[in-house]
């Protein structure tokens, strides 16, 4: 193993412990559904490498609201007519678990925007987004469209998956993708009710051995959706949330086949 590879693996171990505690590759530790407690307000590093302990470029920027004193921290990579708005799992690292996938997706010709919610990173919400998940997600969708995206996929992991399914279409998404989203989460409709209200292309993915996510209820949510293009995928194993898309979060992690499927759905809505 080269020195670079060894360093990347060490970083992956450190980041997994610090960033993904309680919501990454160990689904049994997923907290009960609820609203995250606001994190300390000490200054948050803006450099991705410092913030996320991953050896990659990038700066956390603010996505401001045009009408309210809300702003969300985000990391954006790439450009294109398709945008991915990536909603994170629970964990102090917030958007960090999406960074490697966002960079890979940007290399495929899309705008990938990993977003901190109102209680993570530098995000501060004192307007509608503070108590309205739809308004919070819409802020990121609108920002993506202002940068040229004509098609926006809202993609969420675990907590973010429940939010994507619950409010993605209402927030302006053209495609909704839920990776291991709990079927019940504060601030958004339950999965089956959300499915019934989703008419845009819908992709839900979970894993057979993910004991925290009842696959039958997610399948029922897809079945309830009137969308023309919809799909439920149950993977073997126990990958959870963003672990479904990458084989790790180090800078040299590889995208999984399902990660490629997610990008394909974001681009085409499953219409191929």
Image (spheres, rainbow, N blue to C red):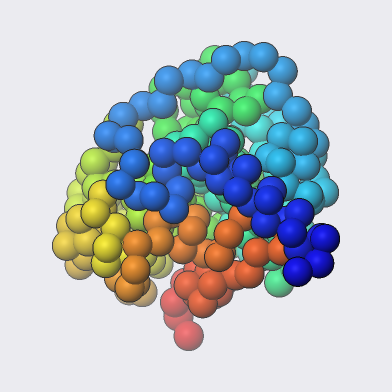
Residue under the image location 41 percent in, 38 percent down: 22
Q: Nearer the viewer, residue 131 or 155?
A: 155
Looking at the image, which is closer to me, 224 or 88? 88
Q: Position of residue 95 (x, y in %)?
A: 59, 41
When the figure is inspected, residue 269 is found, relative to residue 206, above or below; the finding is below
Q: Which residue is nearer to you in this view: 203 or 247?
A: 247
Rendering coords of residue 121 (x, y %): 62, 28
| Residue at 81% in and 60% down | 4
Quadrant assignment, res 1: bottom right
Camera-nearest residue between 66 and 268: 268
Position in image of residue 52 (x %, y %): 68, 40
| Image-quadrant location for residue 111 | bottom right
Q: Residue at x 27, y 63 (%)?
A: 209
* x, y percent for residue 100: 66, 56
Count of numbered badges drawn on the protein = 0
Answer left or right for 117 relative to 99. Answer: left
Task: Report the residue that reaches farthest toward the bottom.
Answer: 272
Image-based side of 31 in relation to 57, left or right: left
Q: Can residue 45 be seen in this snapshot?
A: yes
- Can residue 169 be seen here? The reply is no
Residue appearing at x 71%, y 72% in the figure = 108
């Amino acid at each position: 193993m080269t020195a670079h590879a060894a360093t990347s693996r060490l970083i992956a171990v450190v980041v997994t412990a610090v960033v993904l505690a309680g919501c990454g590759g160990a689904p049994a530790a997923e907290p009960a559904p609820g609203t995250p407690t606001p994190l300390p307000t000490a200054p948050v590093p803006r450099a991705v490498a410092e913030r996320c302990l991953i050896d990659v470029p990038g700066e956390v920027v603010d996505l401001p609201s045009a009408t309210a004193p809300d702003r969300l921290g985000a990391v954006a990579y790439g450009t294109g007519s398709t945008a991915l708005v990536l909603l994170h799992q629970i964990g102090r690292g917030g958007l960090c678990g999406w960074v490697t996938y966002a960079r890979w997706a940007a290399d495929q010709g899309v705008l990938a925007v990993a977003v901190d919610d109102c209680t993570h990173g530098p995000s501060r919400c004192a307007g509608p987004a503070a108590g309205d998940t739809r308004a919070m997600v819409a802020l990121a969708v609108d920002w993506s469209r202002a940068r040229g995206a004509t098609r926006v996929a809202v993609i969420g992991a675990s907590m973010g998956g429940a939010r994507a399914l619950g409010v993605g279409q209402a927030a302006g998404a053209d495609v909704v993708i839920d990776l291991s989203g709990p079927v019940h989460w504060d601030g958004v409709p339950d999965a089956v009710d959300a499915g019934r209200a989703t008419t845009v292309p819908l992709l839900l993915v979970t894993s057979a051995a993910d004991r925290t996510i009842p696959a039958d209820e997610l399948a029922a949510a897809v079945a309830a959706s009137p969308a023309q293009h919809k799909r439920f995928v149950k993977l073997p194993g126990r990958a959870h949330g963003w672990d479904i898309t990458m084989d790790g979060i180090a800078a040299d992690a590889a995208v999984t086949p399902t990660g490629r499927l997610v990008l394909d759905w974001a681009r085409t809505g499953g219409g191929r």
